[in-house]
Amino acid sequence: MIAIVDYGAGNLNSVKKAFDYLGAEVVVTTQPETVAEADKIVLPGVGHFSALSGLDNSGLRDAVLQGVRAGKPFFGICLGMQWLFEGSDEAPELAGAGLFAGRCRQFPSSVKSPHVGWNSLAVREGSRLLRNIAPDSFVYYTHSFQAPVVAATTAATEYGAQFSAAVERDNIFGVQFHPEKSWTVGLIILKNFCEVNFREV
Amino acid sequence: MLTKRIIACLDVDDGRVVKGVQFVNLRDAGDPVECAAAHARDGADEIVLLDITATSDKRRTILDVVSRTARCLFIPFTVGGGIRELSDAAAVFEAGADKIAINSAAVKDPTLIGRIAARFGSQAVVVAIDARRVNRGFEVFIAGGRIPTGRDALQWAREATACGAGEILLTSMDRDGTQAGFDCELVQMVADAISIPVIASGGAGAAQHFIDVFRSGRADAALAASIFHFGIENIGQLKRELHAANVPVRWPC
């Protein structure tokens, strides 16, 4: 069972609907116990980085981190990916999970913000999450802050400068874009996550 | 590279897709669920569904249409028409919309923009502005283009942005349904003045109109309804022409 963690950051219907379409067994939950029982964890979320305080105040943060440490496949989408980093200039007082080095920052002033629409991926070879995704595939974005390119970056996107479109290390996966809104490219990515195996770390 | 979006709009009345010329003379164009799926397959980057004659007794119909349309639609899906309160927006999101579009209600009470954005995020709030040319600039109309407000479109776009809107859907009432081309002057004026994306609407009739509104209008996205439904130009063909003219588009999809 895949648990979609509901910590109060917007509308999670689209993410659930896409997993339903793929035939995955998926529940949307606000309960740490359900996260603890799940085989896989999805952390979605849109909006302001401060919305992630909903994780801290509910016991969900510990449940998610325990699952990650136990080797459960984890998938952060949009804010859920930004959370994997140390923090964000959008809400400096709030700590991210710190699983990847670096902070999320605003776009350079040379481009309009937010970054909204379909942009292309420069995919690095060997990603399990991005298996069967053609180079330069388009995905749908809507965000005002972006994560830096790091060693774990498996795809980058150019908007003013390069930022992390996707990150991956062991059982931890994250994408800045919205796979549930990225047509067949997004559905392939969600399916790849469904097929990732539990991995002891 | 960030691409220019082509958005297919379904104007829906009582569960059917319709399209008029300058907001009247409606013609039937089919089932919204089928139309949305067909546009997505053709390469539409987003779908907008506008409930154009929203009345309270028809709300249930539209929520059912939204739910059935959303079920298998894996591109962004915006719903507008008849959203007056936060609770109306919540019902539409619950039915499966990714964004809502508000028009008259936002003009009457701009705090509605911020209240919806606070709960669902700015990215989910599209403020639709219907504008008509007047002596000095462009005037905002509400109630499906029936009521003039005396407000300036540019100022309203700025205010809506400050209130927390995520995008502006800017319709030229003068061009709506005419297929005479977008009002590039209107679009450029607004696009240059605000930081959030501007979706140009009203007047699409040929590929060159899209090229013009992306180049000289500096639109981030362009929306059209009638030309796509009646097969005058399908989205795949339009995108091939834009691609050939070096306008960045999601093609092949």
Image: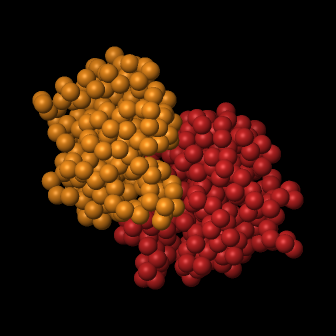
Residue found 87% across the figure and 74% down from its top: B135
Q: Residue furthest left?
A: A200
Q: Which residue sits at x=74%, y=45%?
A: B110
Q: Nearer the viewer, residue B155 or A166?
A: B155
Q: Position of residue A123 (x, y in %)?
A: 24, 59
Q: Pick whichever, B155 or B53, lies toward us.
A: B155
Q: Is residue B159 visible?
A: yes
**Residue B190, picture quadrant:** bottom right
Asked whether, in this view, residue A117 is left or right of residue A149, the answer is right
Which chain is the one coloured red?
A: B
Quadrant in the picture for the N terminus of chain B: bottom left
Q: Is residue A151 above or below residue B202?
A: above
Rendered view: B200 above or below A199 = below
Quadrant of residue B22 within the rendered picture: bottom right
- Residue at 46% x, 83% y is B245
Q: Position of residue B175 (x, y in %)?
A: 73, 73
Left or right of A55 on screen, residue A24: left
- Tell me the quarter of the image containing the C terminus of chain B: bottom left
The tint chain A carries is orange
Residue, x 73% and y 63% (percent of image)? B154
As drawn, B9 above or below B110: below
Q: Position of residue A65 (x, y in %)?
A: 28, 26
On the image, the x and y values in percent for residue B44 come to: 48, 63
Q: Give the camera-side residue of B227 and A163.
A: A163
